[in-house]
Image (cartoon, grey):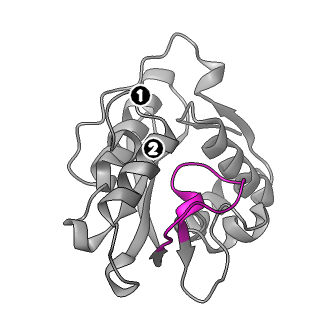
Amino acid sequence: MEIVIASLNLHKVREFREMLRALGGFDILSLHHFPDYQPPAETGKTFKDNAVLKAVHAAQTLGKLVLADDSGLVVPILDGEPGVLSRRYAGEDATDADNRRKLLKALTGKGNLQRSAYFECCIALADPNGLKKAVTGRCEGVITTEERGGNGFGYDPIFMKHDYDKTFAELDEAVKNRISHRGKAFANLALVLEPLVPA
């Protein structure tokens, strides 16, 4: 069965591919297979709003089963920033490095308790008839004072999960996939996906 990962982010597509492969039975595509498809603007106020918007739009336009997510970093002391603007925190054309620099600057001088943060991910599954399921996962930790590690993407080099002494960018990919917000959300979605796997 075909399933489309509604993303052009190569890092995100790779993570979801690994998770879906563990279930088996799916022919995994991404938006790179549909160069003429135009994703909708992410106008939602929450991660769930955006995930559902992307999944339903792609499923109805492409006529396929679609998985879409929206995720980001939430720092309570900064009134929830970057939040749904995580990807464009430092501006529409900001790079991951630009976003990390802005966040580290905003937290300059803050102690460990004030650097608490969590990643949140909402994954939506839709088919041409509409939304099938939306699930959420969270991963709580702290923002480090400097970047560490060369793996991952986004805010991974400055996020350290509670009870770990490595940033997400220092962890082995398999470990990160298991403990991350995206991994937790996918574990909840797997209960819906498993019955769809061809026998």
Location of residue 79 (image quadrant): bottom left
Front-most of residues 94 and 45:
94
Q: Which residues are magenta?
A: 143-159
The percent coordinates of residue 22 (x first, y second) are: 79, 60
- Within 10 angstroms of label 2, few (less than 14), some, or many (20 or more) residues? many
How many marks the image carries: the answer is 2
The percent coordinates of residue 42 (x first, y second) are: 30, 36
Residue 188 in view (yes/no):
no
Residue 60: mark: 1
Location of residue 4 (image quadrant): top right
Specify whether 159 is left or right of 106: right
Residue 126: mark: 2
The residue tagged with tag 1: helix, strand or loop? helix
Q: Is residue 73 above or below residue 153?
A: below
Magenta-span inclusion, residue 121 = no
The percent coordinates of residue 46 (x first, y second) are: 25, 54
